[in-house]
Image: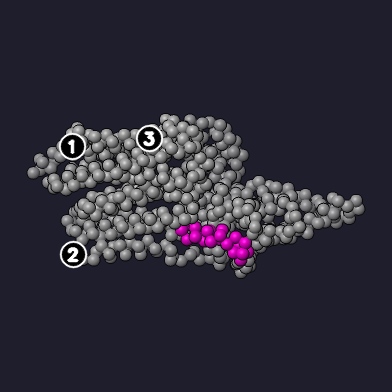
Amino acid sequence: MRLRRAGPLAYAAGLLLASVPLFSPAPRSAFDLKGFAELPVLEGGRVKPLDSLARNSLLLIRGKQSALVDGKRLGAARWLLDAAYKPGLCDTYPVFVVDDPEVLGLLGLERGKSRYFAYWQLEPRRGEIRAQAAAAEKVEAARRTRFQAAVINCDRRLALYERLKNTFMVSGESDPAIELAVFTEVVPLAMRAIHSAKSSEKDRRALKVLAELLQRYRFLAASAAFKPLPPRAGAPADAWSAIGETLLKPTGGLEPHPGLASFALMGRAYIKDDAAAFKSALDEHKAWLERERPDAARHARAEVRFNNAAPFVSGMALYVAALLLVFASWALRREDVCDAARALAWSAFTVHTLGLVARVVLQGRPPVTNLYSSAVFVGWAAALLGLAAERVHRRGFAVAGAAAIGFTTLLIAQHLGASGDTMEMMRAVLDSNFWLATHVVCVTIGYSSTFLSAAMGIAWVIRRHLVKNPDPQASKALSSLAYGVIAFSLLFSFIGTMLGGIWADQSWGRFWGWDPKENGALLIVLWNALILHARWGGFARERGIMLMAVFGGIVTSLSWFGVNMLGIGLHSYGFMDKAFWWLSAFVASQLLVMVLGYLPPRFWEDKA
């Protein structure tokens, strides 16, 4: 039975499934974790909600955005609250990934059923970890051994956790609200002891207490992982401050920052498990934020909604479902199933687009600002091109390529996102919205279209060997489609490369400097031009063009990721061991596809 409305039904179902995370119930808790997660802070040069900070921190420490404690899932916001106000409890949570045997030996631990360990298990050898990491950091990144890289990672995770524990209050403090009250009381008494020739014993005791508190606050200021206190209305927008830093500053006759009391009262309430008092202090701080910094509060709430929606995760699932439906339509030879696949791919693309637009709005930047966002945009542009091409040649090839590339690039983005904040501040040399919106976007569209033509080449090879008695017209249509995509790629790659030269000339006074990234961009232009000339000159026919398109995927991957791992040049982001092996595996797989493409399809001929 054929479904006439398979397409609209599949599209609606895809969007409905993608919206489920937005309406999922929050984890049960007496405390207002949602409100706490929406509080804005300054970290890494940008304002973000505590939700993003907690997720990114836990991702760096554990490799996931949630913890698992006694078989139960612990959200990032709750984990951060425990780290800040109940550090003794949080020290028992197994969140530190340690899987290197030499690091385990250094810590005096053995690998059991789990590779996760608690802070209390690592803390006794903390000094040795720091010493080994300091020695390893003196070695060039590309020359470090596995142990050196692992011990540096372990040290950085421990340091991050220790800073998080000492941001709202000094770890181990019993009642931050009482300490703040004592501090407020002793300051005028201590000042009198300093400036008055006749000071009382009470004043001198106050001076001693103040000295001890100031020493604690200097440590608190130096240890802070982020700045939770927004500037007052009228102050510069970037004048955020840490709690310890604010306590050390003279008030200049002004009232102390209201956030000091709010966070102290929240801490006291959380330590005493008083959910009502916690919410009262939280609501008071949020009300102050709405009066003084409503823009920061709105931005934080919007980013929390984006985090909860997780559009790129939903997009990945929908792309996979669309790809499987395409395969099913080919196996069943049913056009209605192919219609459903197209519609599901469009729903995946819609979710992908919404996520991309949300990032642009949250960052206030063009879509490509770092390696993570380039992966998101490459997949988006490839999906758009593939879906547009499918409207011209309705055989399922283009939608399969669009879904495959959309899923793969979002998967790559997920792995790149494991390194921390994906909306990080721009490097100074890249801080230009005009060039980011022209040069970078054009070059990235060139990547997308070249990958799409490579996917079509792979589909051609697979079809050649797996389909018995393939339709020559279908193969010709696929070849023509790939040819058009290659021409499109050449146009955008060339324009993007030229714009990059103009940007370089304006930035550091030279149009071309043979930087590895510049050379990689030029290779894409030259390879695509070579394919077109090979066809025009008759040097390559259908098979040759499709296999050259497959090799174009290798050229693009080396330009996109390979040159970033060389550790040299203006566009280098540092060597990445795991990325190197994945890139090598991708190149090897594409070379294997090319070899298969050169082999004649004798298996099916013999069967016939």
Distance from disc 3 to disc 2, alpha carbons, whole Å, reads 48 Å
Residue 146 percent across, percent down from the top left: 47, 35
| Amino acid type indicated by mark 1 | Arg
Q: Quadrant of the C terminus?
A: top left
Foreground: disc 3 or disc 2: 3
Q: Secondary structure at mark 2?
A: loop
| Amino acid type indicated by mark 3 | Gly
Residue 132 figure quarter: top right
Give the number of callouts.
3
Query: Which residue position is annotated with label 2?
Result: 2
Query: Which residue position is annotated with label 1?
Result: 541
What is the number of the mark on residue 520? Answer: 3
Residue numbers of the magenta segment: 286-307
Residue 588 percent across, percent down from the top left: 31, 36
Question: Residue at image x 49%, y 45%?
Answer: 432
| Amino acid type indicated by mark 2 | Arg
40 left or right, relative to 268: left
